Amino acid sequence: MYLDAAKKQEIFEKYSFAQKATDTGSAEAQVALFSYRISHLTEHLKKNRKDFVTERALTMLVGKRRSLLNYLKKQDIERYRAIVKALGLRK
């Protein structure tokens, strides 16, 4: 499996800036996890271009990530800027 408990824990430890590493519900942790899953699904779709179910799942994940980022931007712009810079989401 591409995403086991150890990999999730590593992502949460790396991207939870202000909170504890065990805070898996923070917006930063969720955005980081979504970004990891999005990159994995993108690689899958490069190999399997007719997999429309995965394409829809990818679109939904991108929407969820966008919603969380919008929420974070409204609540705390500094946390938003930190996670965007850490993940390299904007150019």
Image (cartoon, rainbow, N blue to C red):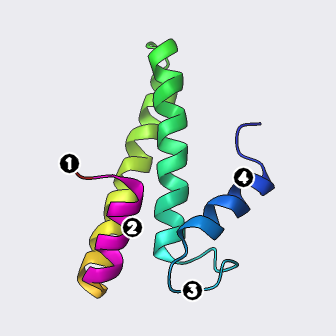
Task: Determine the CA span between mark 4 and mark 2.
Answer: 18 Å
Residue count near mark 2 (Cα–Cα under 10 Å), binned few <14, some 14–19, many ≥20: many
Give residue 21's quadrant in the image: bottom right
Disc 3 is placed on an element classified as loop
- Count residues near mark 4 (Cα–Cα under 10 Å), then give few for <14, some for 14-19, many for 20+: few
Identify which residue is drawn at 37% across, 48% down: 62
Residues at discs 3 and 2 in contact (Cβ within 8 Å): no
Q: Secondary structure at mark 2?
A: helix
Q: Give yes or no for contact between labels 1 and 2 (Cβ–Cβ under 8 Å).
A: no
Residue type highlighted by circle 4? Lys
Q: Quadrant location of the N terminus?
A: top right
As displayed, is residue 27 above or below residue 9? below
Q: Mark 1 or mark 4: which comes first in sequence?
A: 4
Q: Is residue 64 visible?
A: no
Label 2, on which residue? Answer: 83
At 32% from the left and 59% from the top, the residue drawn is 66
Q: Residue 61 in the image: x percent, y percent?
A: 44, 49
Residues in magenta, as a range: 77-89
Q: Could you tell me how far apart the alpha carbons at marks 1 and 2 are, in whole angstroms? A: 14 Å
In percent of width and height, residue 52 lies at 45, 23
User: Which residue occupies the foreground of this view, 88 or 30?
Assistant: 88
Q: Residue 16: where, in percent of width, then height?
A: 55, 75
The residue identified by callout 1 is 91
Tag 3: residue type?
Answer: Gln
Q: Secondary structure at mark 1?
A: loop
* Residue drawn where x is 31% and y is 52% of the image: 89
Q: Main secondary structure of the magenta part?
A: helix
